[in-house]
Image (spheres, rainbow, N blue to C red):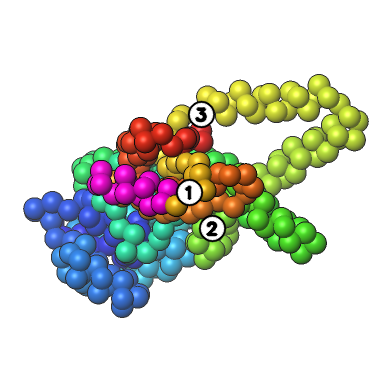
């Protein structure tokens, strides 16, 4: 079987590693020469090619607007009669408006996995494990079974739904939160102009709740424009919700304000813990560091000796007492819990934020 993956970023490269098997040749292509060279040199793909004609499976792992352009291009190329084309984009309905008239089998795909890192060098064969992988086929036929079988080694949870339902769900659970996070960061920028100290204070909880605002701006421009109508409706509902809170404050309605937070807490506390969802889970451990020489080195030695990989490390600057806070980011929940156990055993106070 010949599989071509167009777009060798985090998702495309990770898919190439995850689905590879002995009877399959993985071809790859990316508009960046350095990405192509890295993928070939590090055996992420078997061959580099943009020859679509001989492929059995074509995976478009590129921005949504680029996916639309590729689908138009593929409609003009002679492909195998049995070819299956799929994508990895975060919105589906606009793509399916085009896909209705395509002369080949197209199955929309959306692996709901990601990382704070991007690009081919962030490749992770286990990126999709336990993540939801949504498929939106035009019709449920044998081609869907074929694609599901190809995706089986990713160990993702396959869900089949229609494009409209998909776009509405991810708009609420992912797209709107990204807009809100970006808006909060912009507000903090304005605050910092008047209060320079604000940037330092934002290094704690504010930084955590706005973490997703660090996402790729090009990708999110595409997402918003291709899920435009759904988001316009959601933004209107969001504005109505904020206006309610505003009115509670005007009226000093203590009961209404309490109910607002209480209902939110009730719902939030029942969300799944550390499951892969519309927004990638973060696996962070916070360690109190006393102001003594060698404390940070001791912690990193504990982790490295155990063979645990740290994806990021930073020192938070919001504490003004004798303790600083070291933030360690891990690849997955297993590494996080193992790291927490080892560090705690050395009498460091550490915690995981739920």
Is residue 77 placed above or below 351 in the rendered structure? below
Which label was assigned to residue 292? 1
Can you see residue 222? no
Single out the residue that lies furthest toward the front: 293
Would residue 325 appear left or right of 342 to someone viewing this image?
right
Marked residue nearer the N-terminal end (2 or 3): 2
Residue 16 painted magenta: no
Looking at the image, residue 52 lies above or below residue 182: below
The residues colored magenta run: 294-307
Residue 45 image position (x, y, % from top left) = 20, 64
Asked if the residue under mark 1 is in contact with the one under mark 2, i.e. CB atoms within 8 Å, the reply is no
Q: Residue at x 65, y 56 (%)?
A: 200
Disc 3/disc 1 C-alpha distance (Å): 39 Å
> Does 89 sit left or right of 122 as displayed?
right
Q: Position of residue 338 (x, y in %)?
A: 32, 36
Residue 193 in sight = yes
Position of residue 337 measured from the top left corner of the image (x, y, whole percent): 36, 34
Q: Is residue 297 magenta?
A: yes
Residue that badge 2 annotates:
214
Residue contact at pointers 3 and 1, CB within 8 angstroms: no
Mark 2 is surrounded, within 10 Å at the Cα level, by few (under 14), some (14 to 19) or many (20 or more) other residues, namely few
- Observer-side mark, 2 or 3, equals 2
Q: Give the prevailing secondary structure in the magenta stretch.
A: helix
The residue identified by callout 3 is: 271
Q: Secondary structure at mark 3?
A: loop
Q: Quadrant of residue 69?
A: bottom left
* Residue occupying the far right of the picture: 251
Element at badge 2? Answer: helix
Mark nearer the viewer, 3 or 1:
1
Image quadrant where residue 249 sits: top right
């Amino acid at each position: 079987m010949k599989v071509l993956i167009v777009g060798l970023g985090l998702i495309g490269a990770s898919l190439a590693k995850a689905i590879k098997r002995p009877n399959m040749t993985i071809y790859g292509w990316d508009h960046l020469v350095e990405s192509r060279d890295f993928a070939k040199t590090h055996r992420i793909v078997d061959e580099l090619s943009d020859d679509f004609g001989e492929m059995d499976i074509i995976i478009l792992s590129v921005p949504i607007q680029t996916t639309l352009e590729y689908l138009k291009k593929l409609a003009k190329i002679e492909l195998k009669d049995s070819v299956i084309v799929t994508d990895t984009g975060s919105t589906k309905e606009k793509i399916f408006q085009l896909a209705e008239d395509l002369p080949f089998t197209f199955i929309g795909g959306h692996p709901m996995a990601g990382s704070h890192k991007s690009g081919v060098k962030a490749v992770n064969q286990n990126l999709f494990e336990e993540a939801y992988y949504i498929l939106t086929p035009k019709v449920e036929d044998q081609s869907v079974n074929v694609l599901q079988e190809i995706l089986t080694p990713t160990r993702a949870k396959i869900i089949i739904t229609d494009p409209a339902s998909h776009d509405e769900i991810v708009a609420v659970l992912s797209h709107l939160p990204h807009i809100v996070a970006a808006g909060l960061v912009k507000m903090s920028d304005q605050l910092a102009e008047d209060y320079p100290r604000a940037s330092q204070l934002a290094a704690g909880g504010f930084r955590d709740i706005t973490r997703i605002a660090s996402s790729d701006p090009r990708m999110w421009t595409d997402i918003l424009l291709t899920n435009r109508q759904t988001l316009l409706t959601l933004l209107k509902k969001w504005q109505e919700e904020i206006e309610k809170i505003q009115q509670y404050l005007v009226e000093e309605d203590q009961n209404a304000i309490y109910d607002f937070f209480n209902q939110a807490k009730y719902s939030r506390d029942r969300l799944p813990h550390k499951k892969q969802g519309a927004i990638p889970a973060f696996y962070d451990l916070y360690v109190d560091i006393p102001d003594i020489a060698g404390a940070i080195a001791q912690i990193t030695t504990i982790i490295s000796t155990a063979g645990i990989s740290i994806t990021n490390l930073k020192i938070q600057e919001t504490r003004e007492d004798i303790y600083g806070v070291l933030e360690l980011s891990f690849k997955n929940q297993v590494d996080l819990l193992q790291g927490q156990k080892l560090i705690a055993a050395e009498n460091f106070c550490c915690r995981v934020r739920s």
